[in-house]
Amino acid sequence: MTARRISMLPHDPIWARRFASEAARLLAVFAGGALSVHHVGSTAVPELEAKPILDVLLVARALADLDGARAAAEAADYTWLGPYGIDGRRFLTAQRHEEDADAYRVHVHAFAAGDPNVERHVDFRDYLLAHPRRAAAYGRLKRELAERFADDRASYTEAKTPFVQETEELARAWRRATARARDRR
């Protein structure tokens, strides 16, 4: 992947429609092996500024189902990058173009069911959706870091990592507390 300047955009409702289209495409590509597809990342949180990259979480029965669909994914214009630094993940990217719209990128994070990264991604998204102040703080941080590290994606990511990790811990505890409260009803 080539380095791109980091730019943040205001939340755009079109991101949800693009996700729905991408989810349908992925379910067709991974037919039989895909269990679910989730919109994750900043574009999944209304009112949160984001890089114009659609993050998609694909959950499959097994890694073998993902690997077995590699040719179909590549035929559907996904670039297959394998684990790409995370054991148990299959990372795919795509560049999409729409009439009368800017091009946008898609990042697909695919894991087997039961991989802790599935819960981590979903919990993070759900926590930000349920906690608008935390989402706003994340937005401010990302905007500041995007200005400071506009041409240095690695430094941008490294600088936001402590906030992300803290939020992941809060999200995990929140999910457990929410589940316990639901179980008591």
Image (tube, helix red, strand yellow):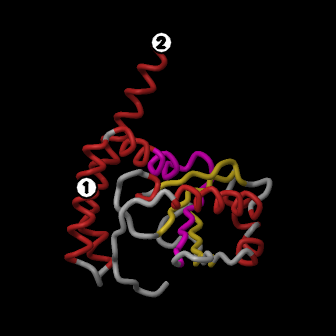
**Residue 106 located left or right of residue 46:** right
Residue 58: x %, y % from top left: 61, 56
Question: Which image quadrant for residue 50?
Answer: bottom left
**Residue 67 located left or right of residue 156:** right
Q: What span is in magenta?
A: 103-122
Q: Element at badge 1?
A: helix
Residue 178: x %, y % from top left: 41, 27
- Front residue (pair 27, 17): 17
Measured in 3D between alpha carbons, the distance from the residue under mark 1 to the one under mark 2, in whole angstroms, is 33 Å
- Front residue (pair 46, 173): 46
Q: Element at badge 2?
A: loop
Residue at 65%, 75% (x, y): give it. 78
Q: Is residue 115 magenta?
A: yes
- Count the marks: 2
Q: Which residue is mark 2?
A: 185
Q: Which residue is mark 1?
A: 163
Question: Which three-letter amino acid code belongs to the residue tagged 2?
Answer: Arg
Q: Is residue 178 above or below residue 26?
A: above
Residue 49: x %, y % from top left: 34, 61
Residue at 36%, 45% (x, y): give it. 128
Question: Which three-letter amino acid code belongs to the residue tagged 1?
Answer: Phe
